[in-house]
Image: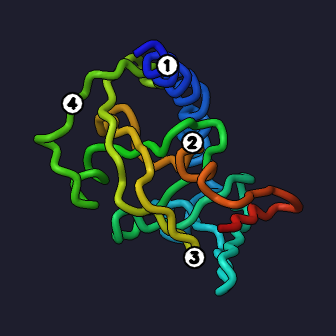
Amino acid sequence: MLMRTLAFVIVAGVLATQVPGLFEALDQPAAQGGDGGTPNLTKITATPSGTTVLKADTTGHFRGTFKLNGKPVEALVDTGASLVAINETTARRIGVSLASLDFKYPIATANGQTQAAHVRLQRVEIGSIKVDAVDAFVLRDKALSGTLIGMSFLKRLGAYSAQDGQLRLVR
């Protein structure tokens, strides 16, 4: 129980420090698409050998279209986040039953205190990389507007590295 509580406190701290940067990046005009409404997604290069490369966007962040439980979701890679973090709307869209969620884990975010529910995603994919049974937190919509791909996905890879504006993910 102590380890579980410690893990959630760490996640809360990471979310509290990383979520503000996500909001700032989304508010910057340089990160907006031609319609002014959504950020430009980075180009993804996938190879059949199990390597996927994300190029940094204009804000220096690595974003892309991931598949969570087979559904496309725009997400920000966040090496400072312990778990993948999604909001209620995304959870519903990828097939998570909101009625089954138990929002019992206290989390501190840029918007203040909130509660999170633990789930296990069936699969997280990007390019040619597929990882099954990935731990994630679901946060209330008002607490998290986007999706963060954290260490619960990244640590399951064979390797990942960022260099020269590229994030290389290797299965």
The residue carrying mark 2 is: 22
Viewer-side label of 4, 2: 4
Query: What is the quadrant of residue 113 in the picture?
Result: top left
Tag in front: 1 or 3: 1
CB contact under 8 Å: marks 4 and 2:
no
Calculate the distance from the C-alpha at mark 1 to the C-alpha at mark 4: 19 Å
Q: Earlier in the sequence, mark 1 or mark 3?
A: 1
Q: Is residue 166 left or right of residue 143?
A: right
Mark 4 touches mark 3? (CB < 8 Å): no
- The quarter of the image holding the C terminus is bottom right
| Three-letter code for the amino acid on which mark 4 is drawn | Asp
Q: Is residue 62 left or right of residue 138?
A: right
Q: Is residue 21 above or below residue 159?
A: above
Q: Earlier in the sequence, mark 4 or mark 3?
A: 4
Task: Calculate the distance from the C-alpha at mark 2 to the C-alpha at mark 3.
Answer: 23 Å
Name which quarter of the figure residue 143 lies in.
top left
Residue 3 screen position, x and y as percent: 49, 19
Mark 3: which amino acid?
Answer: Gly
Q: Earlier in the sequence, mark 4 or mark 2?
A: 2
Count of all numbered marks drawn on residues in the image = 4
Mark seen at residue 127:
3
Q: Which mark is residue 3?
A: 1
Q: Type of residue at label 2?
A: Leu
Q: Which residue is mark 4?
A: 102
For this rendering, which residue is in front, 110 or 135?
Answer: 135
Tell me whether circle 1 and circle 4 mark residues in contact (CB < 8 Å): no
Q: Amino acid at mark 1?
A: Met
Label 4 SS: loop
- Residue 18: where, in percent of width, then height? 60, 33
Q: Nearer the viewer, mark 2 or mark 3?
A: 3
Q: Residue at x 40, y 16 (%)?
A: 1
As measured in the structure, the alpha-carbon distance from the residue carrying label 4 to the one carrying label 2 is: 25 Å
